[in-house]
Image (cartoon, grey):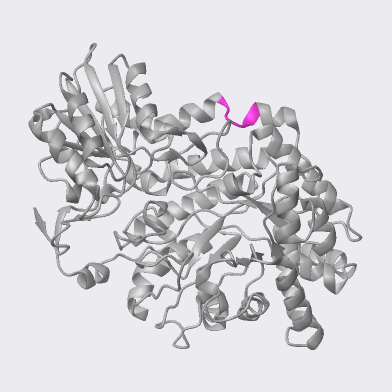
């Protein structure tokens, strides 16, 4: 075991990621070129009414798979929450500068062809405005645990998995693949990569969405992904400024406080954002949290001029678009009403106003502030100009904003993309324990039981981890049965799993966010007691192993998507060597001062 200092000392040892260390430096337009571009964009802006300019700031949600003909159910929800029937009507009413797609609850995403047609419909509505300006269509396609576009699109390892792969080239390749497919779908802004440094294992909102706990490595990964996205014409967005990696509270449901000193913030939180800016990132997303060391007033960062203007723009030199995190989140609504939050965000320095909970209230709030002089038209023009620059850089103002169904078929989910994703995933699976050379499994017609927690796929609730992992082993030649026991198995389900293990050559047990009182611990202990070899696979947090004593073989997959499950199965079966290395330290559950597995740890089959 490895002794470590206190958590405070662990924070103090985080390394600085110098922007030059990323190996990627942003390229900016020459003054003459920038001046000519801005003159052209100001001409467009001069034709806009104040109402149209305000609309350019907003990036709302909507329901439905079509811009003009949603289902009755989606139409009713749009009427209830947005006051319009369709997204085309939303654009016409508020002149919005962009929209954001969501799968699941918003029903925006079914398959690639449908998404492309939806994008074309959004653009047709935008070009029908009195001052026709194409929409900047956005999405949260981080990959891994946070995916919006699933079926048909290439699924790639998420941030912490890429951090385990420790390959900046793989991070760059993943972003290029993702960006190429998003562009083919008519999406030109991706709210990725996550630039938060996850130094709190209990972080409920970031966790595996982060590349890791080392500021230097996170900065390099962020810079690589920024470059990969923007080289294929997709706007990248580094988030969540000034850093959300050391909080035990979720800003969706509360207002977290980051207790880092200014010196700690400089060493731990700032480096990935500095690296992103050095790489030329086009947009940065704010965080709804308090950082007293940066702003003693304790305003949420999204509403803090000290943080957005003073730190992000003046100190770090960021000149691009500042995007608020979703304005429906509790973290930014604890102190002010929904009419004031967007006004205060703009006054703080934000440009794009994402996901207002009530578009009518938010829009009217900003309009009132502009008409009263609280927000000057000059300040409004600053944000609109930045947004138009973004649209111009994405190619929306110099050519057709429409996408081709044939290009969708050729690009999205292309065979070469899927092969690259599979190879990248294989380089991320991390072997943590392998006592007595339990792994790799012997080849042949061995009988396996796959059991345990079985979270649904992020993009397809009809598919889940345990049966998909069992299918992956079947494809490798094993005789496999499976039993999903869930995240909190009761005594009857555990007894059923133990009975199913008898007569098997090995058991693969999946875990998902094991805690000190988790029934998953009991399941693993009971399976170990059968004497059948047990292989543990953490399908989300690599920290699970800290709660599972006696396990003789354990691996971390960092997520439960198909590409990561297949990679883990191939590693367990010995088809490929385990090459992943922990991007975070795993500390003892009962004594966090003691590190079980340090950052950079990972076994191979030769060890």
Left or right? Give the position of 508 relative to 251. Answer: left
- Segment colored magenta: 410-414
Specify whether residue 586 is painted magenta: no
Write down the quadrant of residue 500 in the picture. top left
Which residue is rendered at x = 25% and y = 28% of the image? 572
Which residue is rendered at x = 17% and y = 70% of the image? 6
Position of 33 relative to 143 (above/below): below
Chief SS of the magenta region = loop
On the image, the x and y values in percent for residue 144 come to 44, 43
- Residue 359 visible within the image: yes
Which residue is rendered at x = 25% and y = 42% of the image? 490
Q: Where does the C terminus fall, quadrant-wise? A: top left
Taking depth in this image into account, of 259 and 234 the one nearest to the observer is 259
On the image, the x and y values in percent for residue 54 come to 77, 70
Taking depth in this image into account, of 427 and 18 the one nearest to the observer is 427
Q: Residue furthest top?
A: 445
Position of 254 relative to 379 (above/below): above
On the image, the x and y values in percent for residue 503 come to 15, 18
- Residue 440 visible within the image: no
Taking depth in this image into account, of 113 and 279 the one nearest to the observer is 113
């Amino acid at each position: 075991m490895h002794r470590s200092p206190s958590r405070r000392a662990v924070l103090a040892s985080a390394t600085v990621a110098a922007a030059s260390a990323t190996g990627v430096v942003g390229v900016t337009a020459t003054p003459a070129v920038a001046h000519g571009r801005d003159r052209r964009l100001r001409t467009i802006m001069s034709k806009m009414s104040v109402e149209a300019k305000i609309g350019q700031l907003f990036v709302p949600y909507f329901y439905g798979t079509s811009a003009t003909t949603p289902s009755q159910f989606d139409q009713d929800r749009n009427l209830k929450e947005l006051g319009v029937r369709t997204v085309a009507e939303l654009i016409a009413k508020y002149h919005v500068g962009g929209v954001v797609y969501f799968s699941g609850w918003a029903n925006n995403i079914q398959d690639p062809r449908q998404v492309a047609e939806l994008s074309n419909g959004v653009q047709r509505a935008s070009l029908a405005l009195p001052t026709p300006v194409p929409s900047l269509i956005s999405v949260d396609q981080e990959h891994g645990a946070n995916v919006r576009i699933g079926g048909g699109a290439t699924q790639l390892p998420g941030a912490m998995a890429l951090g385990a792969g420790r390959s900046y080239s793989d991070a760059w390749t993943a972003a290029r693949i993702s960006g190429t497919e998003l562009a083919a779908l008519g999406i030109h802004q991706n709210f990725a990569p996550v630039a938060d440094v996850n130094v709190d294992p209990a972080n409920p909102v970031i966790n595996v969405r982060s590349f890791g706990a080392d500021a230097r490595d996170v900065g390099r990964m962020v810079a690589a992904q920024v470059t990969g996205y923007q080289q294929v014409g997709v706007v990248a967005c580094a988030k969540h400024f000034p850093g959300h990696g050391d909080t035990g509270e979720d800003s969706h449901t509360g207002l977290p406080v980051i207790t880092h000193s200014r010196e700690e913030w400089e060493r731990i939180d700032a480096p990935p954002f500095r690296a992103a800016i050095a790489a030329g990132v086009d947009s940065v997303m704010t965080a709804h949290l308090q950082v007293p060391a940066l702003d003693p007033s304790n305003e949420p960062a999204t509403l803090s001029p000290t943080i957005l203007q003073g730190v992000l723009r003046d100190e770090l030199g960021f000149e691009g678009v500042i995007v608020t995190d979703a304005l429906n989140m509790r973290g930014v609504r604890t102190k002010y009403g929904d009419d004031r939050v967007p006004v205060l965000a703009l006054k703080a320095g934000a440009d794009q106003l994402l996901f207002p909970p009530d578009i009518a209230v938010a829009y009217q709030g900003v309009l009132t502030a502009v008409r009263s002089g609280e927000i000057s038209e000059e300040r409004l023009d600053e944000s609109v100009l930045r947004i138009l620059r973004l649209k111009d850089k994405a190619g929306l103002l110099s050519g057709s904003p429409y996408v081709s169904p044939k290009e969708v078929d050729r690009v999205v989910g292309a065979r070469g993309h899927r092969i690259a994703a599979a190879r990248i995933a294989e380089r991320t699976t991390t072997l943590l324990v392998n006592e007595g050379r339990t792994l790799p499994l012997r080849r042949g017609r061995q009988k396996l039981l796959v059991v345990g927690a079985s979270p649904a796929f992020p993009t397809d609730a009809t598919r889940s981890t345990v049966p998909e992992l069992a299918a992956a082993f079947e494809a490798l030649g094993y005789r496999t049965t499976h039993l999903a026991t869930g995240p909190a198995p009761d005594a009857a389900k555990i007894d059923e799993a133990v009975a199913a293990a008898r007569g098997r050559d090995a058991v693969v047990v999946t875990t998902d966010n094991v805690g000190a009182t988790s029934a998953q611990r009991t399941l693993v202990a009971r399976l170990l007691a059968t004497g059948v070899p047990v292989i543990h696979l953490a399908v989300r947090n690599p920290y699970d192993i800290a709660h599972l004593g006696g396990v003789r073989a354990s691996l971390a997959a960092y997520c439960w998507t198909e590409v990561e499950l297949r990679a883990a199965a191939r590693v367990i079966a010995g088809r490929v060597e385990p090459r992943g290395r922990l991007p975070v330290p795993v500390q003892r559950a009962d004594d966090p001062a003691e590190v079980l597995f340090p950052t950079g740890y990972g076994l191979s089959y030769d060890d």
